[in-house]
Amino acid sequence: MLICDFYISYDEWAETKYYPYEGYDFLLGRDGCLYFLEANAVPAGIYVLSVITRMQYNDLPPYEKHLANDLVKFVDRFAEMALIYYYYERGESPQTAIVTVPPHREGFLNPERIAISYALRRKGIRSWVVGKSKLIYENGFVYFLDPKNHEEIYPDLIIRRSFDFPKKVKQIVINPSEVGYITGSKIRTYKVISKLLDSLPELAKYVKIPFTLYSRSLNKVTRYVEEILEMGKRVIVKPASGSGGEGIIVINSKEELESKKGLLEKSARNKKYLMVQELILPAPVLIKGNRYYAFDIRAYGFMGRLVGLHLRRAPIPIDTNYLDLDYYNVVSNVSAGGVPIIALMDRRSKRDLRFIRTKKYTLRMADKVFRTDDYVTIVGGELLRRIEYIVRVFSKAISSATSL
Ligand SMILES: Nc1ncnc2c1ncn2[C@@H]1O[C@H](COP(=O)(O)OP(=O)(O)O)[C@@H](O)[C@H]1O
Ligand SMILES: [Mg+2]
């Protein structure tokens, strides 16, 4: 049975079985190195990305249009890939599927869950979007009561878009909850990845983990901040199990450490691990007008294949001397005001990054308005090859650490 044209081998499936749908965040440092920030268990963004690509599509020259085709159909591709994954496990297609939703439904992410469900329906699968509170877990199976005809539905396939999901579920779950053990803690993720980098010295030359210390005690955190400042670096403090850029504190200097002690105290109060990390100064490449912005790179993988990229820039520009960086100069999560920028993959281009001018667009979602910049980026050359390779090996490493 031919499900789609996206061919993934059995081995690739087997090696990434516990982390099939990957979302990695990287920074491109001033030194040209990629810095790994985190792996996400439930990477969101594919719907917004496909809509923004559609908006900017008509501004693109023909060759770049061709590069954008996959991104326009990102949600459908996701559905296809989920079916391939299912097929390798079960040898057939699923009849029923659900996409799960967290209790508070985070407004602008909800259309994505609906879009995934519709994409599955277009493939002939009965599919629902189901709130987490409606799901029942019994004897290893997840089911829910379809309110329309009072039918108990045991979905064959579960697209997990919520956290705190049961483990050891007998149905097929993408991504299985088990991977959260690794990805839910940046400390554990770093352990897995630094072990991998130790075993691959070639790779370690161009992807690094930012120098990081961690502790639950305010005293130690303060000492670690001083330690990194003394190394001549700026510091970023973030919760080890954070997401969406929440709770991040930027510290440029000793004076600032004094003035931000209150913030640190507040963060340390709940006794969760805090990461004290060197601040990576971003490569000054994103020029808008004549301004520089810090940006990060999100790479989406499926079964270890790089399938999509986007950049996110921080809302407030930085000057070239990187003076006085603060939260909004540095943190580029979309939920913290960052601006998503589509990044088309060009395997034939020799250049790492290039820009194509487009118009600006506005995308209105329930609780959020996205304004695009007036360009898209094209990633190619060595940078693209590196990211492809990183996604492949990281995915295998995280999957195999999960299966242990
Ligand atoms: N060490 C760092 N140096 C510079 N910027 C950083 C650093 N760590 C995080 N950031 C910025 O903050 C954002 C959020 O950090 P991340 O580690 O991905 O945590 P979260 O789980 O909150 O998304 C990143 O996308 C990046 O823009
Ligand atoms: Mg992140």
Image: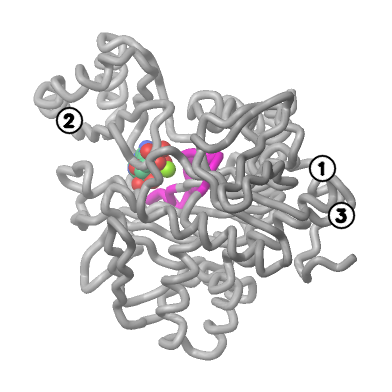
Q: Which residue is mark 2?
A: 253
The 10 Å Cα crowd at callout 1, few under 14, some 14 to 19, many 20 or more, is some
Q: Is residue 60 above or below residue 364?
A: below
| Kind of residue at badge 2 | Ser
In the rendered image, which quarter is residue 264 located in? top left
Name the residue furthest bottom: 62
**Given the image, on which type of amino acid does mark 3 rest?**
Glu
Give the labeled residue for mark 3: 92
Q: Which residue was labeled with disc 1? A: 14
For marks 1 and 3 on the same chain, the one whose residue lies earlier in the sequence: 1
* Left or right of 328 on screen, residue 404: right
Instruction: Locate the C terminus and report the quarter of the image it occupies.
Output: top right
Q: Which residues lie in the magenta part?
A: 27-43
Instruction: Please provide percent x and percent y for residue 56.
Output: 41, 79
Residue at horizontal 55 percent and vertical 24 percent from the top: 188
Q: Where residue 209 sits in the image (x, y, percent)? A: 49, 35
Q: Nearer the viewer, mark 2 or mark 1?
A: 1
Dot 1 falls on a residue whose secondary structure is: helix
Q: Nearer the viewer, mark 2 or mark 3?
A: 3
Q: Position of residue 35 (x, y in %)?
A: 47, 43
Cα distance in 3D space between marks 2 and 1:
47 Å
User: Left or right: 129 with respect to 356?
Assistant: right
Q: Say which of 276 and 50 sits in front.
A: 50
Residue 98's disc is none
Residue 30 magenta-highlighted: yes
* Identity, as a three-letter code, of the amino acid under mark 1: Ala
Closer to viewer: mark 1 or mark 3: 3
Question: Quick one: SS at disc 2?
Answer: loop
Give the CA separation, mark 2 to mark 3. Answer: 59 Å
